[in-house]
Amino acid sequence: MNPNRAEIDDRTDRKTVLVTGASSGIGEAVAARLVHEGHHVVAGARRADRLRALAGRTAEAASRSGGSFHAVQLDVTDREDVAAFVAEARDRTGRVDVFVNNAGVMPLSRLDSLLVDEWDRMIDVNVRGLLHGIAATLPHFTAQGSGHFITVASIGAREVVPTSAVYSGTKFAARAITEGLRQEADPSIRVTTISPGVVASELADSITDSGAAEMMRTYRTHAIQPDAIAGAVSYAIGQPADVDVNEIIVRPARQR
C-alpha cells in the first residue's frame, strides 16, 4: 500500500475530487469548499507555490472534516501530465469520483487585433485541456461503474460580444463537448456543465488588448465571489447517484 495514501472511511458521501486550475479564483474556491465538506481533494495547477499556500490554509479544515488536500503541479495542455495527475489521485485514494475541469484562460481581444498566440493559448487550455481531462478519467469511471465530470464553462458558452469571439468559441466548444459526453456516457457517469457569469478572479488580468481591458473593467463592476460557483459544484456533487444535474448558470443578480 502507498504509505501516503489517504485513509478512506465508509462514508459514501466522501469523494475523491480532482480540480484543475486550483491555484486561484473558482478552482481555489472549489478545492477549499470541498475540503471543508470532508472530501479528498487533489488540486492541480501550474503555480505550485499557490497550491502550497492553499494546502496550508485548508489544513485545519481537513483535520476537522476528515477530508484531505493534495497539491500537484499540472499543465492541462500536456496530455501525459493530465494522465499522471489522475493516476496519482487514484493511487492516493484508491479511486477517482469527480473530475472538475476548471482550468481556463481569457485574454479577450478583437479579431482584428490578430493576437494569434493568445487565440492558440485559449484553444490549448480551454478545449484541449478539457479533452485531456476526459481522456485521462473516463476509463477509470467506466471501470469502477461510477463517476462525475464537471465542466466549468462560462456565460460565454451561450453568448458572443465584441472581443469574446475566440474565448466564446472555446466555451461553446466546451459546452458542446460536455453535452456530447453526457449523451454518450454510461448512465452511471454523471456530467454537469456550470456556466459562471461575472466572477471576481484573475482571468481578466491576462487581457493585453487595451480596448478589451477597458470594456472588461466596466463589465466586471458587479462581480460575485468564486465561492458562489463552488456552491454550485458542491450542489451537483451532493445529489443522489440517480440524479444528474446537467447544467447550472450562476451569475450576479445585476448581470442581465
Image: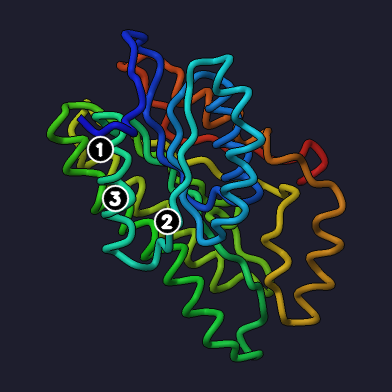
Which of the two discs, 2 and 3, labels the residue nearer the N terminus? Answer: 3
Which residue matches tag 3?
134
Residue 190 appears in the rendering: no
Q: Quadrant of residue 124?
A: bottom left
Please tell me whether residue 207 is drawn above or below residue 12 in the rendered image. below
In the foreground, 164 or 55: 55
Secondary structure type for disc 3: helix
In the foreground, 17 or 248: 17
Query: What amino acid is found at the position of numbered circle 1 in the picture?
Result: Asp
In the foreground, 173 or 200: 200
Estimate the spatial distance between the alpha carbons at disc 1 and disc 2, rounded to whole Å.
Answer: 28 Å
Query: What amino acid is found at the position of numbered circle 2 in the picture?
Result: Ala
Tell me the number on the disc at residue 174.
2
Please state if 55 lies on the left or on the right of 163 as rendered: left
Please state if 52 lies on the left or on the right of 174 as rendered: right
Which of the two discs, 1 and 2, labels the residue nearer the N terminus? Answer: 1
Residue 144 picture location, percent across and down: 16, 28
Please tell me whether residue 27 is drawn above or below residue 174 in the rendered image. above
Mark 1 is surrounded, within 10 Å at the Cα level, by few (under 14), some (14 to 19) or many (20 or more) other residues, namely some
Residue 101 picture location, percent across and down: 43, 48
Please tell me whether residue 79 is drawn above or below residue 15 in the rendered image. below
Estimate the spatial distance between the alpha carbons at disc 1 and disc 3, rounded to whole Å.
Answer: 18 Å
Which of the two discs, 1 and 3, labels the residue nearer the N terminus? Answer: 1
